[in-house]
Amino acid sequence: MGSWSADAGGQRHVFDGLPHLLAAASPRRSGDELAGIAAGSDAERVAARFALADLPLRAFLSETVIPYEADEVTRLILDTHDAAAFAPVAHLTVGGLRDWLLSHEADAAALAALSPGLTPEMVAAVSKLMRNQDLIAVARKRRVVTSFRSTLGLEGRLATRLQPNHPTDDPRGIAASTLDGLLNGSGDAVIGVNPASDSVPNAMALLEMLDGLRERYAIPTQTCVLTHVTNAIEIMRRGAPVDLVFQSVAGTEGANRGFGVDLSILREAHDAALSLGRGGPSGEVMYFETGQGSALSAEAHHGVDQQTLEARAYAVCRAFRPLLVNTVVGFIGPEYLYDGKQIIRAGLEDHFCGKLLGLPMGVDVCYTNHAEADGDDMDGLMTLLAVAGVHFLICVPGADDIMLNYQSLSFHDVLALRTVLGLRPAPEFEAWLERMGIARPDGAIRPPELAASRLLSLAREAGGG
Amino acid sequence: MAEAPTLDPWARLRAATRARIGLGGAGDALPLREVLGFQMAHALARDAVHAPLDVAALEAALHPHPVLRARSMAPDRGTYLRRPDLGRRLQEMEEPPAGPFDVAFVLADGLSATAVQRHAAPVLHACLARLPGWRVAPAVIATEGRVALGDEIGARLGARLVAVLIGERPGLSVPDSLGIYLTFDPRPGRRDSERNCISNIHAVGGLSPEPAAAKLAWLMREALTRKLTGTGLKDDTDPAALAAPAPPPGP
């Protein structure tokens, strides 16, 4: 086990082991304080960053934060590490990597080539030495393009997941929220419902409804019912139309067990989804959600800080070539991310780390009512992420998710963001919006009156005639 | 002959969902009335999180059932929100009478004291009416409490069951939703999978006190018969069985 030290204000701080060093160098957040691993003072935090800056990147290949023998995520990370891709930065320290990432020679192609050579721990470590503007500047250079019926992640584009949840899974209520989202130009990444009930027949009924709607109106997007992966396997076996297989994942084997999954069950689901042949030639058929704090919540954190563990979850995602990944950044509560400042920082870290590792990284910009955050904080985070080139954002009617009882972005928020920053939907979806009279030929989205819209027949179905 | 008035096509859709659909707009933004309505809902939810429990008023509402007061190790609301572990541990409790008891009720503020203030006493009275012959401990009113605080309280009272009535995390549409967690053989270290939960007890289309109490009494009787709670005790309540009072438990 390595030991590092640094002086701060006339005091020597010693950090024994990588987990201690990484945790102490992390920006302050309530989850690490709850776990008892945060820096004891602001000076100790910066001292840890000085020590971390001098750490050779190679150290992460010889010293693990969770033992190889004890954790299949560690084994996945080390067994799939690409030494050739790592070679260009193999001589650098963590601080040296920070400077190189920001350099002008580290362009989109160089960053893309580097991704398989980076481990989650390296990426988490370097993020701890980066200010918010650094996280934005580097993430913006790293575009990740994925495709199914729509092409996502292109320069100048911002996609959305339309999340039409309903507390009792009423198909008419879900159709009504879907209609509202489509009229506001939302849904090019996915139309994805979190079901209130975890039953297989319920999920199948919702899938049939959404797929029928998508087919009837020829909408170039994907649909998803975010049910457990074992349900998805059963649903595919029964022949329901599954575009994307969803699962929440975390950065340790134990936390994944808490979610009821391991790598082999994810592999089984991935194979089953590919065999349906619904996706495009890219074979991107998985959708993952993550979020800082899940491993601590599952009591499976091994004394590692929550941001490093979050980056390790991205190694799990990366192994299955997902169409979509998003962190649900403010959902878990103030004991993990206390306020708007901590949520904003975590959102930028997660987006940066995911992108640098090569993931199509989106964010659920959100908060709960017991966190010290509000809509103004979300306005800030969504704007920062859009500038950073986020793959997609989640939106719900009026920012109010009536099933999960938290606040995400509204369809209106994304309309404003698109206008302010000149960002357009996925090209196939944009063409559809224009055909439906929702977008103008110049790309501007102007939600039509429902009574005059080409989706009025959908309103009649959802409204019961 | 006058034409029939044109109906707002959103009206039918709003009957299918409480979601904030068809809001209109000011440019890309939401209309001001929607912005202010949202801010008011958020303010009510935040007030519910931060409002203190009026213990004296709750004690009066529980009359004539006796009450003990308790508080967790979280000294204030800010600490409570950051340190759920402290909310699960008992700082102090008034001296209880000698047991043993079949069941203890703990009324904890949780994340919405408003919910406990409004709904806990009616649920408790309705439940007690269904438990003739049961040895029921004094109700414990606990402040800055989490669900697992009931484990330590139940153990200290020597109760075979503990039912924790606690304020759920407030949502925008319902800031005062009450939840109930039932645990057999309570003692520190019980896992969440060893509890049964009844949630969404509130007045905005949620479960009302009578059916909530009926469900709770059913679960209590089953728990004592089968000597367990949690994932092993499925909530397959027969609606007909709910009407009958729970017979007294065996000794």
Image: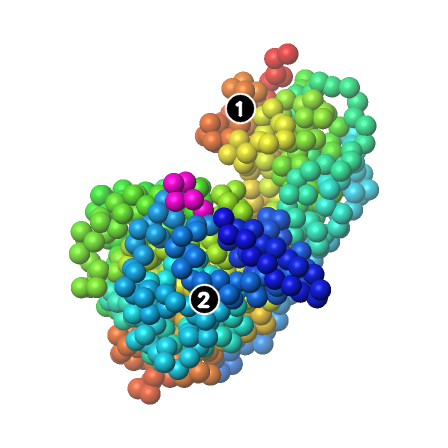
The kind of residue on which mark 2 rests is Thr
User: Residue A142: which quarter of the image?
Assistant: bottom left
Q: Where residue A409 sits: x, y (%)? A: 49, 67
The residue closer to the viewer here, A118 or A366, is: A118
Decide: marks 1, 2 in contact (CB < 8 A)?
Answer: no
- Identified at 74% across, 33% down, the residue is B140
Mark 1, Cα crowd under 10 Å, few <14 / some 14-19 / many 20+, is many
- Give, as a single range, the part of the protein colored magenta: A66-70
The residue closer to the viewer here, A22 or A206, is: A22
- Identified at 53% across, 24% down, the residue is B228
- Queried whether the magenta region covers residue A68, the answer comes back as yes
Q: Which residue is label 2 attached to?
A: A93
Q: Which residue is label 1 attached to?
A: B228
Residue A459, compared with residue A309, is above or below; it is below
Residue A384, compared with residue B194, is above or below; it is below
Direction from residue A75 to residue B24 in the image, left or right: right
Q: Chain of mark 1?
A: B
Mark 2, Cα crowd under 10 Å, few <14 / some 14-19 / many 20+, is many
Quadrant that contains the C terminus of chain A: bottom left
Q: Is residue A206 visible?
A: no
Dominant secondary-structure state across the stretch colored magenta: helix
Residue occupying the far top of the picture: B251
The kind of residue on which mark 1 rests is Leu
Q: Where residue B115 sits: x, y (%)? A: 66, 47
Residue A203, compared with residue A388, is above or below; it is above
- Queried whether the magenta region covers residue B163, the answer comes back as no
Direction from residue A95 to residue A320 in the image, left or right: left
Q: Where residue B110 sits: x, y (%)? A: 66, 45
Q: CA distance from mark 1 to mark 2?
A: 55 Å
User: Residue B189: which quarter of the image?
Assistant: top right
